[in-house]
Image: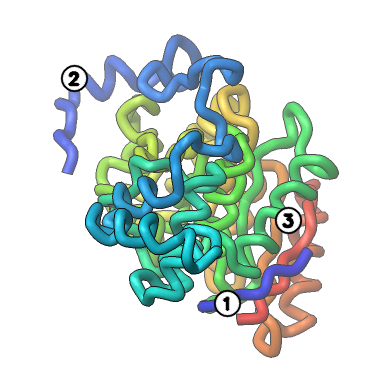
Amino acid sequence: MKASSDTPPTEIPTRATTVAKKNEVRGGDWLAEVRWPDRENALAPGRFLQQKLGDIMVMLELLSSHDRDTVLEQQPQLDLPFGQCCLRLKLIDDEGLSQALAWQFGLLSPASKSFNFGKDLVVISNPLGRYADALRSIGGRLMSAWVKPGRNVLAITSAEVGEGRSHVAANLAISLDQAGWRTLLIDADFRKPRQHINFDSPQHPGLSRLLCGFAPDEVVRRIPYLNRLSLVTSGPLSPNPSELLSRSDLAVFLEKAREYYDIVLVDTPAASNFSDAELIAGAAGNALIIVRKNRTRDRSIQGLVNAFASRGIGIAGSILNVH
């Protein structure tokens, strides 16, 4: 599987509350705050919005109401679709038109207008580009050819640093949301976490707190501008991340999460420097390996695959990051 790129706190409960809730991972209505409506009644991604393109542009503050009316007045003479008229009159650029069309065709939720997303979220900033299209294709292949009940948790990992794990994990999660899949993205990188930055979300309490006893409904956050994506940030960085990740709490949490979501993606550190990636992939049971063109060494990939195979970790495939 290959993706090419166009461009490239919360209040902390008392100790008593934490202890009382520690075992809620193993049962109960632990995701009450992030339960999903029935699919038939939900506004699923991909549904065409019954709004005129000009009104969407005004809503997104790409056009003023006056400019919209000006385009409508001149459209009969120009004999062009509304978006092309905007371009001809130099009232909007290609990127703005791409954004508006993405909203109209249901690739993005209107609630994201004021969201300060990170620069890494190319699927949002350029939803009609080649990179977004490639990731939608990869997501479709994953869901049709690999993911099945009980095999829907994937560690997103790589052999070495700088190969784009967090970038791919975030954009793949968004593309899966856009396709209508209930998706959970977990930042399990306790070395250099990025997902709280990508999604403009508080880093605390996060996964590290969950592994120390916080209840899941305190750390799982809905991403407000997307219909079906939730996030668990890394939480406070632990002085002993490998020890924390080796606890059974991670596997227990992932086992419960797989029941609530169509797919769970877990962002990991690079495998070459720490044992974290292998611990996380072991708890997940499956891994998707990110490989960077002209950077990742063959022996590093083979070493990672062999290490995973020795632990019975399934390899869903690899994504070649050519950026």
- The image quadrant that residue 160 belongs to is bottom right
**Which label is found at residue 16?**
2
Residue at 72% from the left image edge and 72% from the top image edge: 320
Secondary element at image label 2: helix
Toward the front, the furthest residue is 77
Q: Is residue 196 visible?
A: yes
| Image spot of residue 17 (x, y percent) | 21, 19
Quadrant holding the N terminus: bottom right
Q: Which residue is mark 3?
A: 138
Residue at (30% x, 47% y) in the render: 59
Task: Give the residue drawn at x 49%, y 17%.
Answer: 37
Tell whether 30 sits left or right of 277: left
Q: Look at the numbered disc 3 and give the secondary structure of its residue.
A: helix
Query: What residue does disc 1 label?
Result: 6
Q: Are marks 3 and 1 in contact (CB under 8 Å)?
A: no
Find residue 306 and report its horizontal and vertical position in percent: 81, 64
Specify the amino acid type for callout 1.
Asp
277 and 37: which is toward the camera? 37
Q: Earlier in the sequence, mark 3 or mark 1?
A: 1
